[in-house]
Image (cartoon, grey):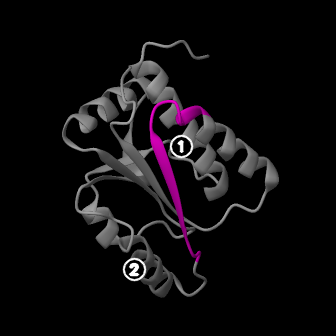
Amino acid sequence: MYGVNRSMIKIICVGKIKEKYLVDAIKEYLKRLSKYTKVNIIEVPDENFDIKKTLIKEKDSILKYIDEKDYIITLDIEGKNISSIELAEKIKNIQINYSDICFIIGGSYGLHKDIKEKSNYSLSFSKMTFPHQLFRVMLLEQIYRTYKINNNESYHK
């Protein structure tokens, strides 16, 4: 089976999830993903200053959790918009050379330019803006879908 014990997915997120229904959805996807890979969700504080200071503080918090061996995918409205099939292929190819993939979800002001420059790949789900808490669930669902696709397992469309 593709991906079992070969890789780790790290998701660095700005802010905490407070809503029970979102916490439950996250737990469900983590349980489903455990069949394929280890997922580590790291929450860094959601800062509340002016834009410049907030981005710097959040950048410093995020950088503490990035490892040299990580393949970094930033979630950014300006990133590349791809299909689920293309994401599955991209992740399969990344895992040939990298054991750990690190997704980064920024705060309400997005991500500091230093984080974007450190990124190996910038991914956009849409030109629309989503609540960061809901987006975490959407990302986990797409990662789960990726493993189902890469293992030739059926999953609803």
Q: Give the camera-side residue of 127 and 28.
A: 28
Question: Looking at the picture, how far across and down is residue 146, in whole percent?
Answer: 45, 28
Whether 92 is among the magenta residues is no
Residue highlighted by disc 2: 60
**Secondary-structure class at tag 2:** helix
Is 14 on the left or on the right of 92, as rendered?
Answer: right
- Please tell me the numbered disc located at residue 91: none
Q: Helix, strand or loop at disc 1? A: helix
- Residue at 57 percent of width and 48 percent of height: 128
- If the image is split into quadrants, where does the N terminus sit? top left
Q: Is residue 138 visible?
A: yes
Query: Which quadrant would residue 66 be assigned to in this image?
Result: bottom left
Name the residue carrying label 1.
139
| 8, 56: nearer the viewer | 8
Q: In the rendered structure, which disc, 1 or 2, sits on the residue that comes first in sequence?
A: 2
Q: Is residue 122 above or below residue 118?
A: above
Q: Residue furthest left?
A: 97
Residue at left 59%, top 75%? 46
Three-letter code for the amino acid on which mark 2 is drawn: Asp
Specify the segment rendered in magenta: 32-46
